[in-house]
Each structure stands twice: as C-alpha cells, then as structure tokens.
Amino acid sequence: AQTVTQSQPEMSVQEAETVTLSCTYDTSESDYYLFWYKQPPSRQMILVIRQEAYKQQNATENRFSVNFQKAAKSFSLKISDSQLGDAAMYFCAYRRAGNQFYFGTGTSLTVIP
Amino acid sequence: DAGVIQSPRHEVTEMGQEVTLRCKPISGHNSLFWYRQTMMRGLELLIYFNNNVPIDDSGMPEDRFSAKMPNASFSTLKIQPSEPRDSAVYFCASSLELRAGGNEQFFGPGTRLTVL
C-alpha cells in the first residue's frame, strides 16, 4: 500500500531564513508524481510544487525547491528566504499511475518575524 | 475558469438532520474527489469518481454517508442522519485523469460543517 509520511508535525523558521520540510513515501511503482500543497489559515489548498518521478532534476518554483531522492523515497521541500506569508500547513502528496492521491499528515510551519 | 466550486461554504445543522454538500468540478476534469479534514484525523479521502463512476469509496465512514455524481459537472455528498462527530471541513477536488496529461488536484474552498 502507498503511504506518505511527514515526520515533522510542526516546524518554525526565522523570517528570511531557509527551512526544509521532510516527506517520505512508500511505493513499489516506478512511475508516479509527488506534490507539495500549502494550506494557509484560509483553508484553501494551494499547489506549491510538483515532481515527476521519471525526472532526475529537482523541481524549483521561485523560493521553493525540492530534494527528490527516488532510491530513498524521499521528497523534501526547501523554502528559501522565508516570508510571513509562508506560514501554513504543508502537505506532501503522492499520485501513482491510477488516479488515487495519498496525502501525508501535514507539517505546520510558523514563520517568526 | 472559476475553479472548483463548493456550496455551501458553511453549514450548521442539528444532529439527526440531513446534510447535502455540493461540488462543481473544473470543466473538462474527469476525476473528482471528496475529502474530510479534522484536527484529529487530518485529511481523509472519502470517495473518488472517474468519469462519473465511483472508483473507491472505502473511505466513506458508514452508511450514513453517500455520494453521487449524476453528470460531469456536479457531485453531492450527503449525510443522513448527521451526527456531531461529522463536524469537519469537507473538500472537493478535481483533476484530469493521469494519462490525459493532468496530474495535480485542484481543491475547492471547502465546506465547514458543524453538527450540534
């Protein structure tokens, strides 16, 4: 069965600093997608970044980047130059070749001014 | 596109009443998902549809919950009778089928349900 594990229920970072959120997953598939979603206090789920498993290059979106280690089944999110607006719950998600998505339990990120 | 639309945004009801949550997916998307989010249990998948057909409803808590998708542009999640433990935020999400090229889910704003 596919599972997604986020081992950090809570994290904090100083404004302008860098923080890394961890995610590991379990799968026997070779073709799949990985995602990070952000959920601010407004509750809206917002896609932050995606990674295709067949791509070796790590995805980057402005201040957000991932460290994708396929063999280790690890998919961490790095937020550089943290801003107050980055404070939110972050969910790691996995999608295999079917349509099912699997979400982690989330990491609550606090940004300290 | 207006994105995934959910209604109502907030619902307060009394125990035993029927509750119907509604969702309009993004036009052209053929997969639709219903999630429930609580502090205790996090984000749980209740059911998902592909081309209007329920594919996996193993997350539906019990017979009090039912979901339908009569056409590609509308889905409902019904709770009858409702109980206080059903209080949660219910999300609807849609996506393109993976082999069609789409791969991310787009979420609606959620419905906050409170059962007194």
Image (tube, rainbow, N blue to C red):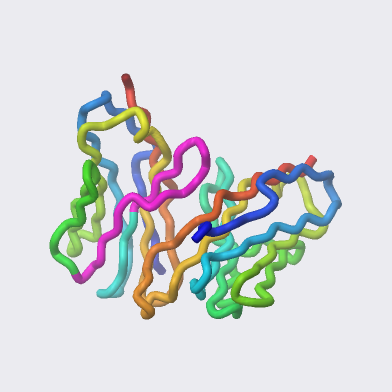
Magenta stretch containing residue A52, yes or no? yes
Q: Which residue is located at x 38 percent, y 79 percent?
A: B100
| Location of residue B15 in the rendering, given as x and y in whole percent from the top left corner | 83, 47
| Location of residue B73 in the rendering, given as x and y in whole percent from the top left corner | 61, 71
Q: Which residue occupies the foreground of this view, A81 or B18? A: A81
Q: Which residue is located at x 21 percent, y 48 percent?
A: A65
In this view, the residue farthest toward the left is A57
Left or right: residue B79 compared with residue B104: right
In this view, the residue farthest toward the top is A113
| Location of residue A17 in the rendering, given as x and y in whole percent from the top left corner | 21, 28
Q: Which residue is located at x 58 percent, y 61 percent?
A: B34
Left or right: residue B110 compared with residue A34: right
Q: Which residue occupies the foreground of this view, A26 or B79? A: B79
**A76 w.r.t. A52: above or below:** above
Magenta stretch containing residue B32, yes or no? no
Image quadrant holding the C terminus of chain B, namely top right
In this view, the residue farthest toward the front is B1
**A2 w.r.t. B113: above or below:** below
Q: Which residue is located at x 84 percent, y 44 percent?
A: B14
**B63 w.r.t. A10: above or below:** below
Q: Which residues, given as a range, are shown in magenta?
A: A36-54
Left or right: residue A98 compared with residue A42: left
Report the label total: 0
Left or right: residue B32 compared with residue A32: right
| Location of residue A59 in the rendering, given as x and y in whole percent from the top left corner | 20, 56
Q: Which residue occupies the foreground of this view, B70 or A67? A: B70
